[in-house]
Amino acid sequence: MQRPPLPPFTQASALAKVQAAEDAWNSKEPERVVQAYTPDCLWRNRHETFQGRAAILFFLKRKWATELNYQLMKELWSYTGSRISVRFEYEWQHADTKEWYRSHGNEHWEFNSDGYMSRRDMSANDISINATELRIGIN
């Protein structure tokens, strides 16, 4: 089974892949998000490295239990062949402290020939913000 758009990417297909990822992540549905990855996908997320859909699903459930009111924006940075790089920002409220944060960083993605992500490398920084500083559309 394939997950279009497929590599090699064009500008239009890379933009479509980025938009699909943004839409899926903004659903905050881990079971939906995890379907975009290969069963053995390798992830580096900040200081964590793990592999496989089960580990990704565990990570996403943990993430969204802590990061409330999550809203994400992704922007295509570059693409070539089977790889896409994006910059992102997301805003969220910490479940325990109720403080707001904006996280921003970069992701580098590699896809297999069927259009599933086989590798994801992510780096990010978080800054504390006031609710009056929200800019990604959280209400």
Image (cartoon, grey):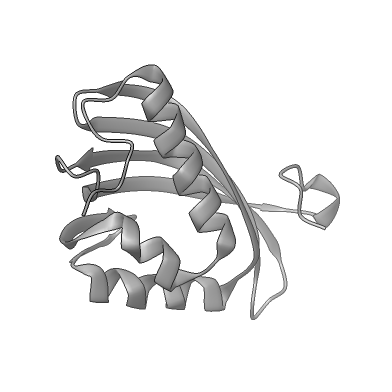
What's the residue at 31%, 31% (across, down)? 84
Given residues 30 and 42, the one toward you in this image is 30
Compared across the picture, whether 16 is left or right of 52 comes to right
Q: Position of residue 120 (x, y in %)?
A: 26, 48
Q: Position of residue 35 (x, y in %)?
A: 33, 62
Compared across the picture, whether 7 is left or right of 73 comes to left
Given residues 1 and 131, the one toward you in this image is 1
> Please, is residue 83 above or below residue 46 in the view?
above
State the quadrant of the N terminus.
bottom left
Compared across the picture, whether 87 is left or right of 122 comes to right
Res 5 → quadrant: top left
State the quadrant of the C terminus.
bottom right
Q: Position of residue 49 (x, y in %)?
A: 21, 62
What's the residue at 23%, 57% (across, down)? 43
What's the residue at 18%, 58% (across, down)? 41
Given residues 131 and 68, the one toward you in this image is 68
Res 44 → quadrant: bottom left
Res 123 → quadrant: top left
> Please, is residue 94 above or below residue 14 in the view?
below
What's the residue at 30%, 68% (across, down)? 56
> Please, is residue 37 above or below residue 53 in the view?
above
Q: Position of residue 90 (x, y in %)?
A: 59, 49
- What residue occupies the far right of the structure in this picture? 132
